[in-house]
Protein backbone atom coordinates (compact mmCIF):
# COMPACT_ATOMS: atom_id res chain seq x y z
CA UNK A 1 0.00 0.00 0.00
CA UNK A 2 2.85 2.39 0.77
CA UNK A 3 4.32 1.84 -2.70
CA UNK A 4 0.89 2.53 -4.21
CA UNK A 5 0.52 5.78 -2.24
CA UNK A 6 3.97 6.92 -3.34
CA UNK A 7 3.13 6.06 -6.95
CA UNK A 8 -0.13 8.03 -6.80
CA UNK A 9 1.56 11.11 -5.33
CA UNK A 10 4.43 10.87 -7.83
CA UNK A 11 2.01 10.51 -10.73
CA UNK A 12 -0.03 13.50 -9.59
CA UNK A 13 3.16 15.54 -9.22
CA UNK A 14 4.41 14.63 -12.70
CA UNK A 15 1.00 15.50 -14.17
CA UNK A 16 0.96 18.91 -12.49
CA UNK A 17 4.53 19.67 -13.61
CA UNK A 18 3.67 18.75 -17.20
CA UNK A 19 0.42 20.73 -17.20
CA UNK A 20 1.76 23.93 -15.67
CA UNK A 21 5.52 23.75 -16.25
CA UNK A 22 5.93 22.38 -19.75
CA UNK A 23 2.94 23.75 -21.66
CA UNK A 24 0.80 20.69 -21.15
CA UNK A 25 -2.27 22.79 -20.34
CA UNK A 26 -1.96 24.70 -23.63
CA UNK A 27 -1.50 21.49 -25.62
CA UNK A 28 -4.48 19.90 -23.92
CA UNK A 29 -6.66 22.97 -24.49
CA UNK A 30 -5.71 23.12 -28.16
CA UNK A 31 -6.44 19.44 -28.70
CA UNK A 32 -9.78 19.62 -26.87
CA UNK A 33 -10.85 22.71 -28.84
CA UNK A 34 -10.04 21.04 -32.17
CA UNK A 35 -11.99 17.93 -31.22
CA UNK A 36 -14.95 20.06 -30.11
CA UNK A 37 -15.04 21.89 -33.44
CA UNK A 38 -14.99 18.65 -35.40
CA UNK A 39 -17.68 17.12 -33.22
CA UNK A 40 -19.80 20.28 -33.47
CA UNK A 41 -19.71 20.06 -37.28
CA UNK A 42 -20.74 16.42 -37.08
CA UNK A 43 -23.58 17.39 -34.71
CA UNK A 44 -25.05 19.72 -37.32
CA UNK A 45 -25.12 16.86 -39.82
CA UNK A 46 -26.58 14.52 -37.22
CA UNK A 47 -29.42 16.95 -36.52
CA UNK A 48 -30.36 17.06 -40.17
CA UNK A 49 -30.43 13.26 -40.21
CA UNK A 50 -32.70 13.18 -37.13
CA UNK A 51 -35.05 15.72 -38.67
CA UNK A 52 -35.18 13.65 -41.88
CA UNK A 53 -36.02 10.53 -39.85
CA UNK A 54 -33.03 8.53 -41.08
CA UNK A 55 -32.54 5.10 -39.43
CA UNK A 56 -30.03 5.15 -36.60
CA UNK A 57 -29.86 8.95 -36.60
CA UNK A 58 -30.85 9.25 -32.94
CA UNK A 59 -28.17 6.80 -31.78
CA UNK A 60 -25.53 8.56 -33.86
CA UNK A 61 -26.56 11.96 -32.50
CA UNK A 62 -26.43 10.78 -28.89
CA UNK A 63 -22.97 9.28 -29.47
CA UNK A 64 -21.77 12.60 -30.87
CA UNK A 65 -23.26 14.45 -27.90
CA UNK A 66 -21.42 12.18 -25.47
CA UNK A 67 -18.18 12.71 -27.41
CA UNK A 68 -18.66 16.49 -27.37
CA UNK A 69 -19.23 16.44 -23.60
CA UNK A 70 -16.04 14.42 -23.13
CA UNK A 71 -13.90 16.73 -25.26
CA UNK A 72 -15.49 19.79 -23.63
CA UNK A 73 -14.53 18.49 -20.19
CA UNK A 74 -11.04 17.44 -21.32
CA UNK A 75 -10.01 21.07 -21.71
CA UNK A 76 -9.62 23.54 -18.83
CA UNK A 77 -12.95 24.04 -17.10
CA UNK A 78 -14.52 25.25 -13.91
CA UNK A 79 -16.22 21.93 -13.15
CA UNK A 80 -12.93 20.08 -12.77
CA UNK A 81 -11.55 22.95 -10.69
CA UNK A 82 -14.34 22.70 -8.12
CA UNK A 83 -14.63 18.90 -8.02
CA UNK A 84 -10.88 18.34 -7.89
CA UNK A 85 -10.29 21.08 -5.33
CA UNK A 86 -13.13 19.96 -3.10
CA UNK A 87 -12.01 16.32 -3.33
CA UNK A 88 -8.54 17.36 -2.18
CA UNK A 89 -9.80 19.65 0.58
CA UNK A 90 -12.66 17.72 2.19
CA UNK A 91 -12.82 14.28 3.79
CA UNK A 92 -15.32 13.07 1.18
CA UNK A 93 -15.50 9.53 -0.16
CA UNK A 94 -14.77 8.72 -3.80
CA UNK A 95 -18.31 7.44 -4.28
CA UNK A 96 -19.91 10.58 -2.88
CA UNK A 97 -17.66 12.91 -4.85
CA UNK A 98 -18.26 10.93 -8.06
CA UNK A 99 -22.00 11.21 -7.51
CA UNK A 100 -21.56 14.95 -6.96
CA UNK A 101 -19.59 15.20 -10.22
CA UNK A 102 -22.35 13.48 -12.20
CA UNK A 103 -25.07 15.60 -10.55
CA UNK A 104 -23.14 18.80 -11.31
CA UNK A 105 -22.71 17.89 -14.99
CA UNK A 106 -26.39 17.04 -15.38
CA UNK A 107 -27.36 20.25 -13.55
CA UNK A 108 -25.22 22.19 -16.02
CA UNK A 109 -27.10 20.53 -18.90
CA UNK A 110 -30.41 21.36 -17.22
CA UNK A 111 -29.32 25.00 -16.94
CA UNK A 112 -28.74 25.06 -20.71
CA UNK A 113 -32.20 23.58 -21.31
CA UNK A 114 -33.83 26.17 -19.04
CA UNK A 115 -31.89 29.05 -20.60
CA UNK A 116 -32.75 28.17 -24.21
CA UNK A 117 -36.31 27.16 -23.38
CA UNK A 118 -37.02 30.39 -21.52
CA UNK A 119 -35.18 32.46 -24.09
CA UNK A 120 -36.98 30.93 -27.06
CA UNK A 121 -40.51 30.50 -25.73
CA UNK A 122 -40.88 33.08 -22.96
CA UNK A 123 -38.51 35.97 -23.69
CA UNK A 124 -38.33 35.67 -27.45
CA UNK A 125 -34.55 35.99 -27.50
CA UNK A 126 -32.42 35.51 -30.58
CA UNK A 127 -29.55 33.04 -30.77
CA UNK A 128 -27.07 35.86 -30.11
CA UNK A 129 -28.93 37.01 -27.00
CA UNK A 130 -28.94 33.51 -25.54
CA UNK A 131 -25.26 32.84 -26.20
CA UNK A 132 -24.32 36.30 -24.91
CA UNK A 133 -26.26 35.64 -21.72
CA UNK A 134 -24.41 32.36 -21.23
CA UNK A 135 -20.96 33.77 -21.97
CA UNK A 136 -21.13 37.34 -20.67
CA UNK A 137 -23.50 37.06 -17.70
CA UNK A 138 -23.65 33.48 -16.44
CA UNK A 139 -19.97 32.64 -16.99
CA UNK A 140 -18.60 35.38 -14.68
CA UNK A 141 -21.38 34.66 -12.18
CA UNK A 142 -20.28 31.02 -12.11
CA UNK A 143 -16.62 31.90 -11.53
CA UNK A 144 -17.59 34.31 -8.74
CA UNK A 145 -19.66 31.55 -7.09
CA UNK A 146 -16.72 29.17 -7.41
CA UNK A 147 -14.41 31.74 -5.83
CA UNK A 148 -16.84 31.98 -2.91
CA UNK A 149 -16.76 28.19 -2.52
CA UNK A 150 -12.96 28.39 -2.37
CA UNK A 151 -13.16 31.18 0.18
CA UNK A 152 -15.50 29.10 2.33
CA UNK A 153 -13.03 26.20 2.28
CA UNK A 154 -10.28 28.56 3.45
CA UNK A 155 -12.46 29.87 6.29
CA UNK A 156 -13.42 26.36 7.31
CA UNK A 157 -9.79 25.25 7.29
CA UNK A 158 -8.77 28.22 9.43
CA UNK A 159 -11.55 27.39 11.88
CA UNK A 160 -10.19 23.85 12.12
CA UNK A 161 -6.72 25.21 12.87
CA UNK A 162 -8.08 27.53 15.56
CA UNK A 163 -10.07 24.68 17.11
CA UNK A 164 -7.01 22.43 17.10
CA UNK A 165 -4.91 25.11 18.79
CA UNK A 166 -7.56 26.05 21.34
CA UNK A 167 -8.53 22.46 22.12
CA UNK A 168 -5.67 20.03 21.37
CA UNK A 169 -6.93 16.52 20.75
CA UNK A 170 -5.40 13.12 21.26
CA UNK A 171 -5.34 10.17 18.87
CA UNK A 172 -8.94 9.35 19.82
CA UNK A 173 -10.25 12.79 18.85
CA UNK A 174 -10.76 13.88 22.50
CA UNK A 175 -9.57 17.14 24.05
CA UNK A 176 -6.28 16.57 25.86
CA UNK A 177 -7.36 18.99 28.63
CA UNK A 178 -10.92 18.01 29.50
CA UNK A 179 -11.40 14.73 27.66
CA UNK A 180 -14.35 15.96 25.59
CA UNK A 181 -14.62 16.26 21.82
CA UNK A 182 -14.80 19.94 20.80
CA UNK A 183 -14.81 19.21 17.09
CA UNK A 184 -15.04 16.34 14.61
CA UNK A 185 -12.50 13.59 14.68
CA UNK A 186 -10.90 12.42 11.44
CA UNK A 187 -13.55 9.72 11.07
CA UNK A 188 -16.33 12.15 11.86
CA UNK A 189 -14.95 14.63 9.34
CA UNK A 190 -16.73 12.71 6.58
CA UNK A 191 -19.77 14.73 7.65
CA UNK A 192 -18.07 17.77 6.10
CA UNK A 193 -19.50 16.58 2.80
CA UNK A 194 -22.92 17.81 3.81
CA UNK A 195 -25.88 18.67 1.65
CA UNK A 196 -24.93 22.34 1.98
CA UNK A 197 -21.58 21.65 0.35
CA UNK A 198 -23.30 19.66 -2.38
CA UNK A 199 -25.78 22.45 -3.12
CA UNK A 200 -23.02 25.07 -3.22
CA UNK A 201 -20.83 23.03 -5.57
CA UNK A 202 -23.61 21.98 -7.93
CA UNK A 203 -24.96 25.53 -8.10
CA UNK A 204 -21.56 27.10 -8.77
CA UNK A 205 -20.98 24.71 -11.68
CA UNK A 206 -24.52 24.75 -13.08
CA UNK A 207 -24.82 28.56 -13.20
CA UNK A 208 -22.85 28.51 -16.44
CA UNK A 209 -24.53 26.22 -18.99
CA UNK A 210 -22.39 24.27 -21.44
CA UNK A 211 -21.86 26.30 -24.64
CA UNK A 212 -22.17 23.17 -26.76
CA UNK A 213 -25.48 22.27 -25.15
CA UNK A 214 -26.79 25.80 -25.79
CA UNK A 215 -25.72 25.55 -29.44
CA UNK A 216 -27.38 22.14 -29.82
CA UNK A 217 -30.64 23.25 -28.18
CA UNK A 218 -30.90 26.41 -30.28
CA UNK A 219 -30.54 24.39 -33.48
CA UNK A 220 -32.98 21.73 -32.31
CA UNK A 221 -35.61 24.26 -31.32
CA UNK A 222 -35.21 25.98 -34.69
CA UNK A 223 -35.55 22.64 -36.53
CA UNK A 224 -38.61 21.68 -34.44
CA UNK A 225 -36.88 18.66 -32.89
CA UNK A 226 -36.71 20.01 -29.34
CA UNK A 227 -36.70 16.56 -27.72
CA UNK A 228 -33.53 15.65 -29.59
CA UNK A 229 -31.88 18.76 -28.16
CA UNK A 230 -33.03 18.05 -24.61
CA UNK A 231 -31.87 14.43 -24.75
CA UNK A 232 -28.61 15.46 -26.40
CA UNK A 233 -27.88 18.10 -23.75
CA UNK A 234 -28.33 15.54 -20.97
CA UNK A 235 -26.08 13.05 -22.79
CA UNK A 236 -23.49 15.82 -23.15
CA UNK A 237 -23.68 16.20 -19.40
CA UNK A 238 -22.92 12.50 -18.96
CA UNK A 239 -20.00 12.83 -21.37
CA UNK A 240 -18.66 15.69 -19.27
CA UNK A 241 -19.19 13.64 -16.13
CA UNK A 242 -16.98 10.86 -17.50
CA UNK A 243 -14.02 13.24 -17.12
CA UNK A 244 -15.03 14.94 -13.88
CA UNK A 245 -15.54 11.56 -12.22
CA UNK A 246 -11.94 10.65 -13.12
CA UNK A 247 -10.82 13.96 -11.62
CA UNK A 248 -12.83 13.16 -8.48
CA UNK A 249 -11.22 9.74 -8.11
CA UNK A 250 -7.73 11.18 -8.62
CA UNK A 251 -8.35 13.96 -6.09
CA UNK A 252 -9.64 11.58 -3.41
CA UNK A 253 -6.83 9.08 -4.03
CA UNK A 254 -4.18 11.81 -3.82
CA UNK A 255 -5.66 13.22 -0.60
CA UNK A 256 -5.89 9.80 1.02
CA UNK A 257 -2.29 9.07 0.07
CA UNK A 258 -1.12 12.41 1.47
CA UNK A 259 -2.94 11.84 4.78
CA UNK A 260 -2.02 8.18 5.13
CA UNK A 261 0.96 8.91 7.36
CA UNK A 262 -1.01 11.04 9.83
CA UNK A 263 -3.29 10.12 12.71
CA UNK A 264 -5.16 11.86 15.53
CA UNK A 265 -4.30 15.55 15.94
CA UNK A 266 -1.73 15.37 13.15
CA UNK A 267 -4.36 14.21 10.67
CA UNK A 268 -6.73 17.00 11.69
CA UNK A 269 -4.03 19.65 11.25
CA UNK A 270 -2.90 18.19 7.92
CA UNK A 271 -6.46 18.08 6.61
CA UNK A 272 -7.02 21.69 7.71
CA UNK A 273 -3.86 22.78 5.90
CA UNK A 274 -4.89 20.97 2.71
CA UNK A 275 -8.33 22.57 2.94
CA UNK A 276 -6.83 26.06 3.27
CA UNK A 277 -4.40 25.60 0.37
CA UNK A 278 -6.97 23.97 -1.94
CA UNK A 279 -9.60 26.60 -1.10
CA UNK A 280 -7.15 29.43 -1.74
CA UNK A 281 -6.16 27.97 -5.12
CA UNK A 282 -9.81 27.56 -6.13
CA UNK A 283 -10.61 31.14 -5.12
CA UNK A 284 -7.55 32.63 -6.86
CA UNK A 285 -7.99 30.71 -10.12
CA UNK A 286 -11.74 31.41 -10.27
CA UNK A 287 -11.19 35.10 -9.55
CA UNK A 288 -8.53 35.28 -12.27
CA UNK A 289 -10.93 33.68 -14.74
CA UNK A 290 -13.79 35.97 -13.73
CA UNK A 291 -11.97 39.31 -13.92
CA UNK A 292 -11.49 39.38 -17.75
CA UNK A 293 -15.22 38.68 -18.19
CA UNK A 294 -16.46 41.50 -15.96
Image (spheres, rainbow, N blue to C red):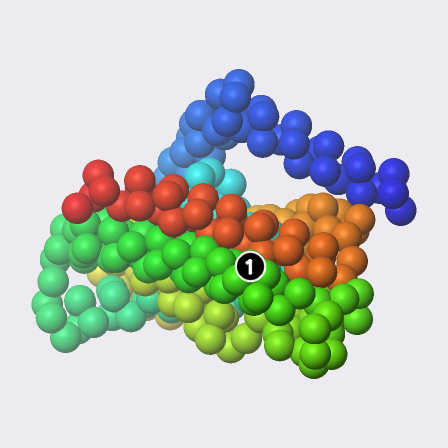
Nearer to the camera, 249 or 187? 187
In the foreground, 8 or 257: 257
The percent coordinates of residue 168 (x first, y second) are 66, 65
The residue singled out by tag 1 in the image is 161
Could you say which quadrant of the image residue 151 lies in? bottom left
Camera-side residue: 29 or 125?
A: 29
Q: Position of residue 109 (x, y in %)?
A: 40, 63
At a point 79% along the width and 71% down the height, the residue shown is: 172
Q: Which residue is pictured at 25% across the width and 66% down the height? A: 115
Query: Residue placed farthest to the front in the image?
Result: 177
Q: Residue at x 38, y 67 (%)?
A: 203
The answer to which quarter of the image holds residue 126 is bottom left
* Residue 221 visible somewhere in the drawing: yes
Which residue occupies the foreground of this view, 284 or 269?
A: 269
Q: Secondary structure at mark 1?
A: helix
Residue count near mark 1 (Cα–Cα under 10 Å), binned few <14, some 14–19, many ≥20 = some
Residue 288's spot in the image, x, y percent?
Answer: 31, 40
Determine whether, in the image, residue 131 is placed left or right of residue 103. Answer: left
Which of the 4 quarters of the picture holds residue 150?
bottom left
Q: Is residue 229 left or right of residue 83?
A: left
Answer above or below: position of 169 versus 245: below
Amino acid sequence: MRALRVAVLAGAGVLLVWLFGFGGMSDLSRWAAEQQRETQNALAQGLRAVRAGEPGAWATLMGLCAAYGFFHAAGPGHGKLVIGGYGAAARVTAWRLSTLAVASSLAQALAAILLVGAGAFVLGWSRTQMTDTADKVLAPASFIAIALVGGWLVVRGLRRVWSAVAHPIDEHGQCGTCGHAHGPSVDQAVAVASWRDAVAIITSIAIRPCTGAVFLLILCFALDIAWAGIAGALVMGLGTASVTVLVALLAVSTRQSALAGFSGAGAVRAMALIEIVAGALIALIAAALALPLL
